Image: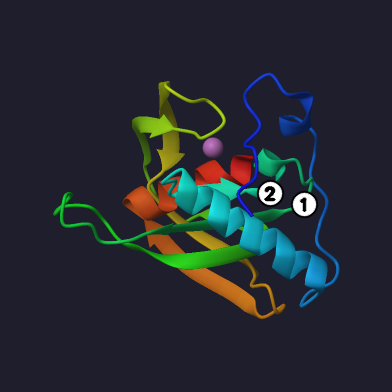
Amino acid sequence: MIREVLRMGDARLLAKSQHVTQFGTGELDALLVDMRDTMAHLNGAGLAAPQIGVPLRVVIFGVHANPAFPGRIEIAETVLINPVIEPVEGTLTVDDWEGCLSVPGLRGLVPRHERIRYRGFDEAGNPVERIAEGFHARVVQHECDH
Ligand code: NI
């Protein structure tokens, strides 16, 4: 189900989210269905559970190839729960423009680590660990900030 995305100024966006403690549950599956529906509806690259009013450490992200944007970088569809991010040693910090579904119509110049390692779990509780750089690293840092 497509859910309403909370906008900047909503106090729920500022609350500290809780860790997920149970995986493979109906509640978690239902949350992820709603997050995917909402992100697809708004053509987002990522979405965090607090953006639909659920204070859990759950983010999704992914970017598909699109013939209209031949240079666009693809990112595999990913569910990342209880994420931990660390910069790869020696990485640079890079400024670039970001948008956010909770801040419609605006973009901000945001410094991010160019290369990161991220860890977390998928919806079944399997560990996820990846090294990411560039736009992929930026999207992950943005979503986990939520
Ligand atoms: Ni955002």
**Depicted 106 relative to depicted 42: above or below:** above
Mark 2 and mark 1 in contact? Answer it, CB < 8 Å: yes
- Please tell me which residue is depicted at 14% across the width and 54% down the height of the picture: 70
3D distance between C-alphas at marks 2 and 1: 6 Å
Helix, strand or loop at mark 2: helix
Q: Could you say which is closer to the camera, residue 90 or residue 71?
A: 71
Name the amino acid, label 1.
Leu
Q: Is mark 1 within 8 Å of ligand 1?
A: no
- Position in image of residue 50 (x %, y %): 71, 42
Is tag 2's residue or tag 1's residue first in the polypeptide sequence? 2
Q: Which residue is mark 2?
A: 49
Q: Quadrant of the C terminus?
A: top right
Front-lying residue, 143 or 45: 45
The residue that appears at 70% across and 79% down in the rendered structure is: 124
Name the colouring of the figure: rainbow
Residue 104, x across and y down, in percent: 48, 25
Residue designated by label 1:
56
Q: Position of residue 10 (x, y in %)?
A: 72, 23
Q: Residues within 10 Å of mark 2 (few under 14, many from 20)?
A: many
Q: Does residue 24 appear in the picture of this structure?
A: yes
Q: Secondary structure at mark 1?
A: loop
Residue sitting at x 34%, y 49%: 135
Q: Amino acid at mark 2?
A: Ala
Instruction: Tell whether 132 sits left or right of 140.
Output: left
Q: Is residue 23 left or right of residue 77?
A: right
Count of numbered tags = 2
